[in-house]
Image (tube, rainbow, N blue to C red):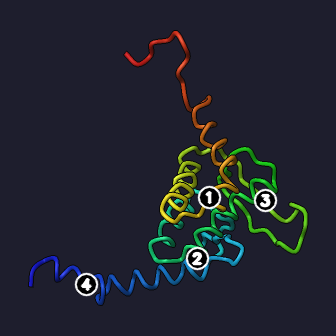
C-alpha cells in the first residue's frame, strides 16, 4: 500500500476523520436557521465574526449545504441593510426576526478589510459556481459598493501624480 492509499484510509476512517466529523457537526449545530453562526464553543464571547463566513460558505458549498451557505451570507447582508451599515461589520450579534426593529442586534464596526474581503469572496464563489441568479442580483449592489470601498482611503494609497511605486 502506498502513502496516498494510507492517507486516504486515515482521512476516511482514522482519528483524523473522527476529528473532522466532530468539528463539522459542531459547526452545523452552531448554525442558526436565520444564518447566524455562533463562534464560541463555550459562550465565553458572543457574536459572529463575519470573516468566518468567508470560510464557512465554501465549506457548506463543498458539502452540499447550499442553503446554509446562502443563509449565512444573507444574515450578514440583511444585517447590514437593517443597521444601515455601509461596510461589512467585524462582528454581529444575532437578530430576533420576531422583532421588527434593530434594537435587538449589535454590530461591531472595527474596520478590518481582510475580513470584509473574505465575505465578498464567499459571495462570489456561491454566485459563480451555483448559478444563484436571484441571490446574486439581490445583493449585487451591496457587494459592489463594498468592493468599491476597497479602492478608497485608507486602503488604497495611490494619488495621481505621485510615483510612489518606483
Residue drawn at 79 percent across, 68 percent down: 95
Q: Residue 161 location, x and y as percent?
A: 52, 9
Label 2 or label 3, whichever comes before in sequence order: 2
Q: Nearer the viewer, mark 1 or mark 2?
A: 1
Residue under label 4: 10
What's the CA distance linking mark 4 and mark 1?
Answer: 32 Å
Residue under label 1: 50
Residue under label 3: 106
Q: Which of marks 3 and 1 is in front?
A: 1
Q: How crowded is mark 1: few (under 14 residues within 10 Å), some or many (20 or more)?
A: many
Label 4 or label 3, whichever comes before in sequence order: 4
Is residue 72 rendered to the left or right of residue 80?
A: left
Report if the CB atoms under discs 4 and 3 are less than 8 Å apart.
no
Frontmost residue, 60 versus 162: 60
| SS for dot 2 | loop
Report if the CB atoms under discs 4 and 1 are less than 8 Å apart.
no
Residue drawn at 71 percent across, 48 percent down: 109
| SS for dot 1 | helix
Identify whether 150 is placed above or below 12. Answer: above
Q: Residue 92 location, x and y as percent?
A: 71, 60
Residue furthest to the left in view is: 1
Frontmost residue, 74 versus 15: 74
Mark carried by residue 73: none
What's the CA distance linking mark 2 and mark 4?
Answer: 26 Å
What's the CA distance linking mark 3 and mark 1?
Answer: 13 Å
Label 3 or label 1, whichever comes before in sequence order: 1
Label 4 or label 1, whichever comes before in sequence order: 4
Label 1 or label 2, whichever comes before in sequence order: 2
Is residue 151 rendered to the left or right of residue 107?
A: left
Residue furthest to the top in view is: 161
What's the CA distance linking mark 2 and mark 3?
Answer: 20 Å
Amino acid at each position: 500500500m502506498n502513502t496516498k492509499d494510507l492517507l486516504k484510509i486515515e482521512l476516511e476512517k482514522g482519528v483524523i476523520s473522527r476529528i473532522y466529523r466532530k468539528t463539522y457537526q459542531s459547526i452545523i449545530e452552531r448554525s442558526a436557521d436565520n444564518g447566524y453562526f455562533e463562534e464560541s464553543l463555550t459562550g465565553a464571547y458572543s457574536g459572529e465574526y463575519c470573516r468566518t463566513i468567508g470560510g464557512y460558505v465554501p465549506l457548506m458549498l463543498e458539502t452540499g449545504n447550499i442553503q446554509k451557505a446562502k443563509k449565512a451570507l444573507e444574515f450578514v447582508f440583511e444585517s447590514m441593510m437593517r443597521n444601515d451599515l455601509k461596510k461589512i461589520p467585524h462582528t454581529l450579534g444575532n437578530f430576533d426576526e420576531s422583532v421588527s426593529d434593530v434594537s435587538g442586534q449589535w454590530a461591531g464596526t472595527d474596520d478590518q478589510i481582510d475580513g470584509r474581503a473574505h465575505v465578498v469572496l464567499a459571495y462570489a464563489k456561491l454566485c459563480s459556481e451555483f448559478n444563484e441568479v436571484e441571490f446574486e442580483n439581490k445583493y449585487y449592489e451591496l457587494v459592489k459598493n463594498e468592493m468599491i470601498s476597497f479602492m478608497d482611503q485608507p486602503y488604497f494609497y495611490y494619488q495621481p501624480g505621485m510615483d510612489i511605486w518606483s
